[in-house]
Image: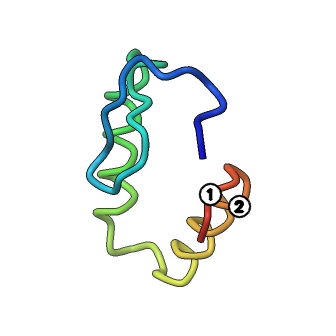
């Protein structure tokens, strides 16, 4: 499957997904801080976290 947007490089993330950081570098730090706060928190119910992850995958048309 080819990307719908042209990517600045052919690099891949640790999960094998295309690296799209170059498309919006100004929000990289903010996204990183948010991910650390959300996924590092033990106050969020794991079931809710998984449901949100699955919903986002569906919205972004990712394979589950």
How far across and down, in percent of the image, does residue 36 sit? 30, 51
Figure label count? 2
The residue closer to the viewer here, 10 or 23, is: 10
- Assign the C terminus to one quadrant of the image: bottom right
Tell me which residue sits at (38%, 35%) in the image. Answer: 19
The residue closer to the viewer here, 35 or 43, is: 35
Residue 2: quadrant of the picture: top right
Quick one: SS at disc 1?
loop
Q: Are the residues at dot 2 and dot 1 in contact (C-beta closer than 8 Å)?
A: yes
| Location of residue 26 with respect to 20 vertically, above or below | above
How far across and down, in percent of the image, does residue 18 sit? 42, 39
Pointer 1: residues within 10 angstroms few (<14), some, or many (20+)? few
Q: Which residue is mark 1?
A: 62
Residue 21: quadrant of the picture: top left
Tell me which residue sits at (73%, 53%) in the image. Answer: 59
| Location of residue 3 with respect to 58 vertically, above or below | above
Pointer 2: residues within 10 angstroms few (<14), some, or many (20+)? few
Quick one: SS at disc 2?
helix
Q: Tell us which disc is closer to us: 2 or 1.
A: 1
Residue 4: quadrant of the picture: top right
Tell me which residue sits at (61%, 65%) in the image. Answer: 63
| Location of residue 28 with respect to 16 vertically, above or below | above
Q: Is residue 39 left or right of residue 3?
A: left
Cα–Cα span, label 2 and label 1: 6 Å
How far across and down, in percent of the image, does residue 14 sit? 26, 52
Residue extending furthest front? 1
Q: Is residue 24 left or right of residue 64?
A: left
Q: Is residue 11 left or right of residue 27?
A: left
| Location of residue 64 with respect to 11 vertically, above or below | below
Q: How is the image coloured?
A: rainbow
Q: Is residue 24 left or right of residue 56?
A: left
Q: Which mark is residue 58?
A: 2
């Amino acid at each position: 499957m080819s990307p719908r947007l042209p990517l600045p490089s052919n690099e891949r993330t640790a999960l094998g997904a295309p690296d799209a950081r170059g498309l919006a570098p100004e929000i990289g730090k903010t996204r990183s801080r948010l991910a650390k706060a959300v996924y590092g928190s033990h106050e969020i119910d794991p079931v809710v976290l998984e449901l949100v992850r699955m919903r986002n995958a569906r919205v972004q048309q990712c394979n589950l």
